[in-house]
Amino acid sequence: MSRSLLIHRAGPGLTLQDLGRSGYLDVGLSRGGAADRLALFEGAALLGQEAGAVVVEMAAMGGEFEATQDIRIALTGAPMRAKLDGAPLVWNASHLLPAGARLSIGPVLHGCYGYLHVGGGIEGNRLMGAQSAHLSAGVGGVLAAGDRLEIGPDGGTETGMTLDRDDRFTGGAVRIVASFQTHLFAAADLERFCSAPLRRDARANRMGVRLTPEGVGFHVEGGRNVLSEVIIPGDIQITGDGTPFVLMSECQTTGGYPRIGTVVPCDLPRMAQAPAGAEVWFRFVGQDEAVALEQAAAGARAALRRRLRPLIRDPRRMADLLSFQLISGVVSGGEPDT
């Protein structure tokens, strides 16, 4: 029997995702891929495999899954309520999913996008070098109850490992660089853009995130004369009514709205995971600082495997074992009688 993952129940936003497709902007197809790319690297580290493996992306809600054979899984991204045959599972960790057991994943607790990884990755038809669904372009589609996902060969065996969760699921500070139209905005508007928080609107998807400013929106003289040109994930467009939109993984490839700035790529996961109502603070950085931030982020991704720790510590490998009180009430025997 082939190794498969059966979907018995599916939330409305389940898709297959990987790192996306590069090199197709000239034919009108943006990169796509996982909304939170860092979560793919975290899952790869937990399972000891490449970050390009295909995973299940779960927007806001998970589903119920069953494996036809024992498989390894990892859960990353926005934490969700997860249970294995009714027993709670730790998020941001790797686990064994035995054949026939039911994995239930509920709604998000924080953030927006959770990820289900499997050892060996999910196999299927590749189109233009990737398997990821690009919903806005009509490539692939959402997963549904009754779908059967084929799983590739898994060369690993380790489970029961975890990574400390970071703080990218509640909004916060986001670094940006100047874009082609930043200089067209008045200095007062640029200062206001970075001096007060913007609130993540409920209207958001894999194409973009709408932000609500305090007070009036942001405007630029001559904004209607901006020519359509190439745009990328992270660009912050200001629409005609002054509303900022941060473009995400499935954004269009050209646009004519003025861009007040562009999110540094390593901060896009924080932007993607900011839940509705969360406050986001923007800060401009120079090109040199942005390059340094990207280099540091790449180093941190490469070091993820060194940050793994076991969910259950093995006493035989605990260098600090004697610092723990292992049995309550035990004394050394040298205390005076009372």
Image (spheres, rainbow, N blue to C red):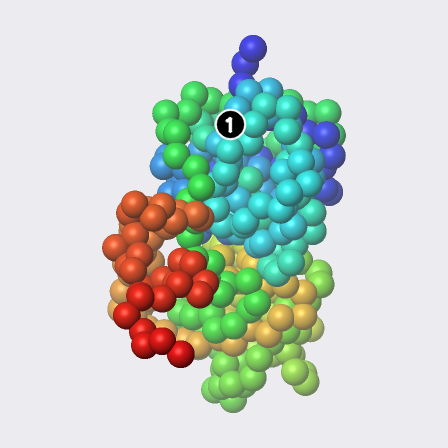
Image quarter (top left, top right, bottom left or bottom right) of the C terminus: bottom left
Can you say whether 104 is above or below 125 in the image?
below
Q: Position of residue 96 (x, y in %)?
A: 51, 33
Residue at 47% across, 70% down: 174
User: Residue 12: x percent and y percent?
Assistant: 73, 42
Locate residue 5, reporting x and y percent. Answer: 60, 26
For label 1, the residue is 71
Quadrant hosting residue 332: bottom left
**Residue 89 as seen in the image, left or right of residue 166:** right
Q: Amino acid at mark 1?
A: Ile
Residue at 68%, 85% (x, y): give it: 215
Residue at image coords 51%, 85%: 195
Nearer to me, 144 or 88: 88
> Is any atom of residue 96 visible in this view?
yes
Q: Please report the residue visible at 71 percent of the width from the left and 61 percent of the height from the top.
A: 203
Quadrant where the N terminus sits is: top right
Residue furthest out toward the top: 1
Whether 107 is drawn above or below 213: the answer is above
Tell me the element at label 1: strand
- Asked if residue 214 is positioned above or below residue 256 in the image, the reply reads below
Q: Quadrant of residue 137?
A: top right
Report whether 338 appears left or right of 255: left
How many labels sit on residues? 1
Q: Is residue 80 above or below residue 234?
A: above
Foreground: 173 or 238? 173
Is residue 30 visible in the rendered image? The answer is: no
On the image, which quarter does residue 329 sit in?
bottom left
